[in-house]
């Protein structure tokens, strides 16, 4: 791994950024060396070990999906009334995870938050892979994915009918596909200067060729940079509403129905907060080990991690507020069905342990981040992040299964239990995500080297300007 | 900052690749949209081979036999009915009873094994279709099956796509005729066709039927 100099670290003089975003006395060359190192070094035993585990997960996905296609949806634990179960729980969970990437790349860019620079590439890649995992679930939930792949879209078919535009499930198709397209473009655009750097610094002609094709002729001219900056800003503008819209529409899948526990107006904001919450937790769960093993501690500093923990605390509080409001309205509305779902079925019903686990992970655990000690302790934040991932999965389970399994009619009541196929597919998507992520770490720099170098110049310039105050320089 | 692999001509190549990919992708999709609408993809305009050279022209036009003589369950059941060999033999035990062309019919009759005809109009199994309701509401045979009286061998003349079904189910009036004229191959409305259609729809109690469960039960 690259050696990173931490000696003679100058104190930041930016009053808005008191802690350091880049540690050590770095130059463009040293940043290039350390940030591209994990691409040019052959993967070690650790990478191969993790990749092997990820491939095993991927195999479970293959087995689960093949068995589902062979046997039909009956292979899953879904029943009547629990017609939506793991398929939608996992869909919402994965879609939510993607939101950290979009928030970091779009909103933090527009707000000129400098700390986004070292983590945006990483988080955007997670968005893409999370959306891919998410898309598998609704597709296979239809039972015949080879039709669903295009039947979901409005196209001039010979059937003489269109998708039901009044249904939020159709809005979902648009929301998620737009989300994926914009995220992919954003991620790729951000990669172009780094791909060009990789092209220029690679030793083998084949790699030069491949990176060269993807770099799309980038030469780093002034015109290239001007157009690059504009497109990046425009894509950020396009992505910004997506941070809010995607999970809002996902929440409409539930909120527009009349089922107690689903039919609430707080769902859209509370889903968005939950999505960012789970997304940051997922980024942190991967970032903590990755910065260690890839030698990125000088660019992903404690300052970055602390900021992410603050976002987790803030969004965790919003999610908690959502829970409180849901329960308050259930009581205040005087609707006996709403009351029963929130105060009897969820808290004391057959799935109560999952409800209380959700409360613990999503409401109690983030409170630890009020303490600066916890925010800057690697082990604590990593465990907390993993617990938040668990908690957010439980939240989707609680919303979907507990509401469905105790419907208006007691004669319809039925318990739900997932089958081995459900587990296999769920664990399989984690395998798919990990596989894609490890490949990403192998082939492109995990940190946007261009942006870090730019930031270094900016900060050096700023420091220079502060010491030589009053001196005019252009 | 220069890589010696790429030359200026590669810019053109790259742009051309992007154009080809975009045009190819768009062209493939557009091509599929068009292809599925061609008579070839819909198995139309191609006479279906049958085990016996049965000529509808002769039986309906020359002899004036009503459709329902052979397809006799069309008014009562979902299936219009393919006549049993015994029905053929009503006439063919007397006429053309030495003709070589009718050997398969006599063989079927003697061995008591039905003729195996090849289906021309087939809707998927998830579609519920009932002949009797259409005939009893005044939809003529010719409306869907075309001029069978002029076909040497029967061919499919309707697309049988769902949009074709829905075109009529959304506004059925213009495809109606008096119930007693359903088997007439040449019936034309007398007077204003729109007015005739309106009156017929009212008289036959015909309404739009576009619920999913009308056909997918």
Image (cartoon, grey):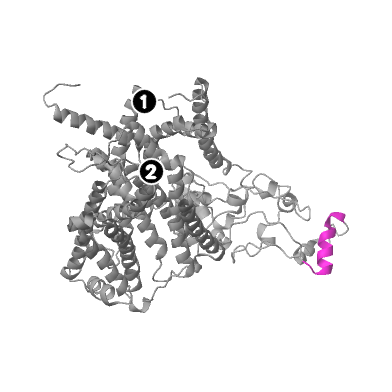
Give the percent coordinates (x, y) of residue B125: 58, 61
Give the percent coordinates (x, y) of residue B91: 79, 62
Magenta stretch: dominant secondary structure: helix
Observer-nearest residue: A164 or A212?
A212
Local packing at callout 2 (Cα closer than 10 Å; few below 14, some 14-19, many 20+) is many
**Chain to which the residue tagged by mark 1 belongs:** A
The kind of secondary structure element at disc 2 is loop
Q: Which is more foreground, mark 1 or mark 2? A: 2
A119 sits left or right of B166 in the view: left
Res A224 label: 1
Observer-nearest residue: B96 or B195?
B96
Relative to A209, say whether A48 is above or below. below
Res. A234 in view = no
Res. B79 in view = yes
- Residue at image coords 46%, 51%: A47
- Which quadrant, please, contains the N terminus of chain A? top left
- Same subunit: marks 1 and 2: yes
Relative to A307, say whether A330 is above or below. below
A330 sits left or right of B22 in the view: left
Q: Earlier in the sequence, mark 1 or mark 2?
A: 1
Q: Any magenta on residue B101?
A: yes
Distance in Å between CA atoms under marks 1 and 2: 23 Å
Q: According to the image, label 2 marks what residue?
A: A446
Observer-nearest residue: B202 or B57?
B57
In the image, which residues are magenta? B99-113
- Residue lying furthest bottom in this view? A411
Q: Any magenta on residue B196?
A: no
**Chain to which the residue tagged by mark 2 belongs:** A
Res A464 label: none
Relative to A175, say whether A466 is above or below. above
């Amino acid at each position: 791994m690259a050696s990173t100099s931490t000696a003679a670290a100058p104190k930041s003089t930016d009053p808005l950024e008191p802690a350091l975003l880049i540690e050590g006395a770095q130059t463009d060359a040293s940043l290039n060396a350390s940030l591209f190192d994990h691409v040019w070094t052959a993967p070690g035993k650790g990478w191969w070990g993790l990749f092997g585990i990820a491939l095993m997960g991927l195999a479970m996905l293959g087995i689960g999906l093949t068995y589902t296609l062979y046997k039909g949806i009956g292979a899953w634990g879904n029943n009547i009334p629990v017609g939506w179960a793991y398929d939608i729980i996992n869909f919402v969970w994965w879609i939510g995870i993607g939101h950290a990437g979009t928030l970091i790349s779009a909103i933090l860019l527009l707000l000129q938050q400098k700390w986004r620079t070292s983590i945006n590439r990483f988080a955007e890649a997670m968005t893409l892979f999370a959306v891919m995992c998410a898309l598998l679930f609704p597709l296979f939930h239809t039972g015949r994915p080879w039709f669903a792949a295009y039947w979901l879209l409005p196209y001039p078919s010979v059937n003489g009918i269109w998708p039901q535009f009044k249904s939020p499930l159709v809005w979902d198709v648009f929301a998620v596909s737009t989300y994926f397209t914009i995220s992919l473009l954003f991620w790729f655009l951000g990669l172009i200067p780094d791909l060009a750097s990789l092209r220029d610094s690679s030793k083998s002609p084949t790699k030069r060729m491949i990176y060269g094709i993807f770099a799309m002729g980038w030469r780093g001219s002034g015109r290239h940079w001007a157009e690059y900056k504009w497109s990046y800003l425009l894509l950020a503008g396009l992505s910004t509403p997506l941070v809010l819209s995607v999970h809002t529409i996902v929440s409409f899948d539930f909120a527009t129905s009349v089922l107690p526990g689903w039919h609430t107006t707080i769902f859209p904001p509370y889903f968005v907060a939950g999505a960012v919450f789970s997304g940051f937790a997922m980024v942190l769960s991967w970032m903590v080990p990755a910065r260690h093993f890839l030698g990125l501690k000088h660019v992903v500093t404690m300052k970055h991690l602390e900021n992410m923990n603050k976002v987790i605390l803030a969004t965790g509080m919003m999610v908690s507020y959502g829970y409180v409001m849901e329960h308050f309205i259930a009581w205040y509305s005087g609707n006996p069905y709403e009351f029963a779902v929130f105060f009897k079925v969820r808290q004391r019903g057959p799935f109560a342990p999952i409800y209380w686990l959700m409360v613990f992970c999503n409401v109690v655990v983030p409170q630890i981040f009020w303490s600066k000690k916890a925010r800057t302790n690697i082990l604590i934040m990593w465990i907390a992040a993993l617990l938040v991932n668990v908690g957010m999965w439980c939240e989707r389970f609680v919303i979907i299964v507990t509401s469905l399994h105790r419907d208006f009619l007691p004669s319809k009541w039925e318990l739900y239990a997932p089958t081995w196929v459900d587990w296999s597919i769920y664990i399989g998507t984690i395998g798919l995500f990990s596989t894609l992520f490890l490949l990403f770490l192998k082939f492109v720099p995990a940190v946007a080297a261009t942006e870090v170098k730019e930031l270094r110049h900016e900060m050096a310039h700023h420091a220079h300007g502060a010491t030589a105050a009053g001196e005019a320089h252009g | 900052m220069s890589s010696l692999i790429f030359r200026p001509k590669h810019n053109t190549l790259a742009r051309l690749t992007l154009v080809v990919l975009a045009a190819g992708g768009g062209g493939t999709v557009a091509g599929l949209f068009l292809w599925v609408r061609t008579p070839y993809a819909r198995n139309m305009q191609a006479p279906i081979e049958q085990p016996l050279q049965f000529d509808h022209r002769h039986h309906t036009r020359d002899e004036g036999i009503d459709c329902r003589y052979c397809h006799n369950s069309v008014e009562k059941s979902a299936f219009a009915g393919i006549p049993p060999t015994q029905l053929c033999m009503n006439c063919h035990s007397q006429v053309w009873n030495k003709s070589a062309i009718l050997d398969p019919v006599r063989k079927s009759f003697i061995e008591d094994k039905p003729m195996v005809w090849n289906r021309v109009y087939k809707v998927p199994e998830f579609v519920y279709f009932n002949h009797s309701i259409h005939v009893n509401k005044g939809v003529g045979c010719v409306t869907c099956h075309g001029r069978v009286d002029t076909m040497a061998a029967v061919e499919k003349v309707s697309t049988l796509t769902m949009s074709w079904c829905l075109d009529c189910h959304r506004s059925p009036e213009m495809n109606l005729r008096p119930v007693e004229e359903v088997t007439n191959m040449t019936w034309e409305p007398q007077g204003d066709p729109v007015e005739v259609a309106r009156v017929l729809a009212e008289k036959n109690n015909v309404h739009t039927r576009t619920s999913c469960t009308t056909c997918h039960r």
